């Protein structure tokens, strides 16, 4: 009754008690076997999330009966109500119960931290909407806060809904639409916001909102009439067409805001704050200089991993890495990786356990490859030069998964194997650095170049382009899977064993040398 209470019913008129915050299995005929969960220091129960959802509904009810009452309120009174409600909202978000681990494959958004985050941001938009339309009386801090909240709503909804079979709701539609409009309104009305907001945030948030609305229009017939205003052709094709037109209009608005924003001072001595730990913001000149210098030096010395990493980061944005991130968002496993943000290290993988796995498992192949090549998963450098925090994680994930690609294909780490693997990665991920690394082909020996042209180049082009995107493999969950099964699942052919080919060539050269020595010795004896 409390959870589904219509807003027209006063909260005081609902006399149903809240459920006790305790699991059903500890309730007996004689009483409770332990005390109810009270503070965040205790583990949550099966009803903790539901109770917290009801608390948010109660806060919304107070918003309607105080700040947005039908009675006329002065600006000062409404602002006082708004400040009080904001304190309650902050307390609600701070005391949100931890999320219990899932016990089935079904994901309930009510039991994720993202649900609390998106409703926290959405409630900020509702609280501040009256201030946003006050003529000349709204401080730019309110516009800035609402812009950040709207951006958060769009980005969280994109991660939760794009490419999934999740059922959308009218509340989702309203919240996403309100967030998109509020984002544009804040940009339009506040010169201070236009001067402060980063261009990358604009080009990230606007498409996120459009992607959500397109997904709703194409997968939810009841919502399509509200997203489409073409009464002559109200079909799904028209919905997509009109929303793409809206996307183009937002792109024009984005261009306008970026062109008319006051330029922010950005120099070596006056950098903006980092977007994540270790981030180094770069000017355009600095980024181009790093890309060119690191690229040239890495061709001279391909063993310089730091130079190769710098080339990868400075050339991957603004087009290629967002494409790879969107590919992860379109895949169920890729979305889980972005949500969980796992890291591949020797500690998280437990290499000793991997050595005990059966032969031909992914984990055993991986650790055998590490031991054979003498490398460690802890040597991957942290991302520094990518501005977008989520794209930075995508690059970090690709970097840490590189050794798994070696183990999956069996290609060794010396130059010939690296060039073949980089060619495969370029066709599969389209990261420019992997394509640039193929230029090391010209530094290889003549026999190695011939082998690449005839064997490994065609293999890389064929398998990289037609296989599934390997960035979407949750390696931590596939360690005990069969390598052959994973290759078949991804559509990757096993390349010829490069070590064996090189070993046969060495043996052939040694035998030829020995035979030549014997002939020379025989000729000397006869003379």
Image (tube, grey):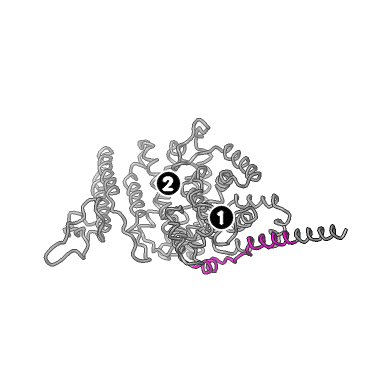
Evaluate whether residue 212 shows in this view.
no
What kind of element bears circle 2?
Answer: helix
Residue 119 in view of the camera: yes
Query: What kind of element bears circle 1?
Result: helix
Q: Position of residue 520 (x, y in %)?
A: 82, 58
Image location of residue 337, percent across then percent down: 44, 57
> Over which residues does the magenta segment extend?
482-511
Q: Closer to the camera, 496 or 98?
A: 496
CA neighbours of label 1 inside 10 A, class few (<14), some (14 to 19), many (20+): few
Please name the residue shown 58% across and 52% down the image: 431
Q: Residue furthest top?
A: 269
Which mark is nearer the camera, 2 or 1?
A: 1
Q: Are marks 2 and 1 in contact (CB under 8 Å)?
A: no
Q: Residue furthest left?
A: 30
Q: Is residue 514 above or below residue 315?
A: below
Rounded to the nearest whole Å, what is the CA distance between mark 2 and mark 1? 51 Å
Relative placement, left or right, of 175 versus 514 is: left
* Residue 391 shown in magenta: no
- Residue 223 occupies quadrant: bottom left
What residue sits right under mark 1 in the picture?
Answer: 373
Label drawn at residue 183: 2
Q: Position of residue 10 (x, y in %)?
A: 20, 54
Q: Is residue 104 left or right of residue 292?
A: left
* Residue plotted at (73% across, 54% down): 446
């Amino acid at each position: 009754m409390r959870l589904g209470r219509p807003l027209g019913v006063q909260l005081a008129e609902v006399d149903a008690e809240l459920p006790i915050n305790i699991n059903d299995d500890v309730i007996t005929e004689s009483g409770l076997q332990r005390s109810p969960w009270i503070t965040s220091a205790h583990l949550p129960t099966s009803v903790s999330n539901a109770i917290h959802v009801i608390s948010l509904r109660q806060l919304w009810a107070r918003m309607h009966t105080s700040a947005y009452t039908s009675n006329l309120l002065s600006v000062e009174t409404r602002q006082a109500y708004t400040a009080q409600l904001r304190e309650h909202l902050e307390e609600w978000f701070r005391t949100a119960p931890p999320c219990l681990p899932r016990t089935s494959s079904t994901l309930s958004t009510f039991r994720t931290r993202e649900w609390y985050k998106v409703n926290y941001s959405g409630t900020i938009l509702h609280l501040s909407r009256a201030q946003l339309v006050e003529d000349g009386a709204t401080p730019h801090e309110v516009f800035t806060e609402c812009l950040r909240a709207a951006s958060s709503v769009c980005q969280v909804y994109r991660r939760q809904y794009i490419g999934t079979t999740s059922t959308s709701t009218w509340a989702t539609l309203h919240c996403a639409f309100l967030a998109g409009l509020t984002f544009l309104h804040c940009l339009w009305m506040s010169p201070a916001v236009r001067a402060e907001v980063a261009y990358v945030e604009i080009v990230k948030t606007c498409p996120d909102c459009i992607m959500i609305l397109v997904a709703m229009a194409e997968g939810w017939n009841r919502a399509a009439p509200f997203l489409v205003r073409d009464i002559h052709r109200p079909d799904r094709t028209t919905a997509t067409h009109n929303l793409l037109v809206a996307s183009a209009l937002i792109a024009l608005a984005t261009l306008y805001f970026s062109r008319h924003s006051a330029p922010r001072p950005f120099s070596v001595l006056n950098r903006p704050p980092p977007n994540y730990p270790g981030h180094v913001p770069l000017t355009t000149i600095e980024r181009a200089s790093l890309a060119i210098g690191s690229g040239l030096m890495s061709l001279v010395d391909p063993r310089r991993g730091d130079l190769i990493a710098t080339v990868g980061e400075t050339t991957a944005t603004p087009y290629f890495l967002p494409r790879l991130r969107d590919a992860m968002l379109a895949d169920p496993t890729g979305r889980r990786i972005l949500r969980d943000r796992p890291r591949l290290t020797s500690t998280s993988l437990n290499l000793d356990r991997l050595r005990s796995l059966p032969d031909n498992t992914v984990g055993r192949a991986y650790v055998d490859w590490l031991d054979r090549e003498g490398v460690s998963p802890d040597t991957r450098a942290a991302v520094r030069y990518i501005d977008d925090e989520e794209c930075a994680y995508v690059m970090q994930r690709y970097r840490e998964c590189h050794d798994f690609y070696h183990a999956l294909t069996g290609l060794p780490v010396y130059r010939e194997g690296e060039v073949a693997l980089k060619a495969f990665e370029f066709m599969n991920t389209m990261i420019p650095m992997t394509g640039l690394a193929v230029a090391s082909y010209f530094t290889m020996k003549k026999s190695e170049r011939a082998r690449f042209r005839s064997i490994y180049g065609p293999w890389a082009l064929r398998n990289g382009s037609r296989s599934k995107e390997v960035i979407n493999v949750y390696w931590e969950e596939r360690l005990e899977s069969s390598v052959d099964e994973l290759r078949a699942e991804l559509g990757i052919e096993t390349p010829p064993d490069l070590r064996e080919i090189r070993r046969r060539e060495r043996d052939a050269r040694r035998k030829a040398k020995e035979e030549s020595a014997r002939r020379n010795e025989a000729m000397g004896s006869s003379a």
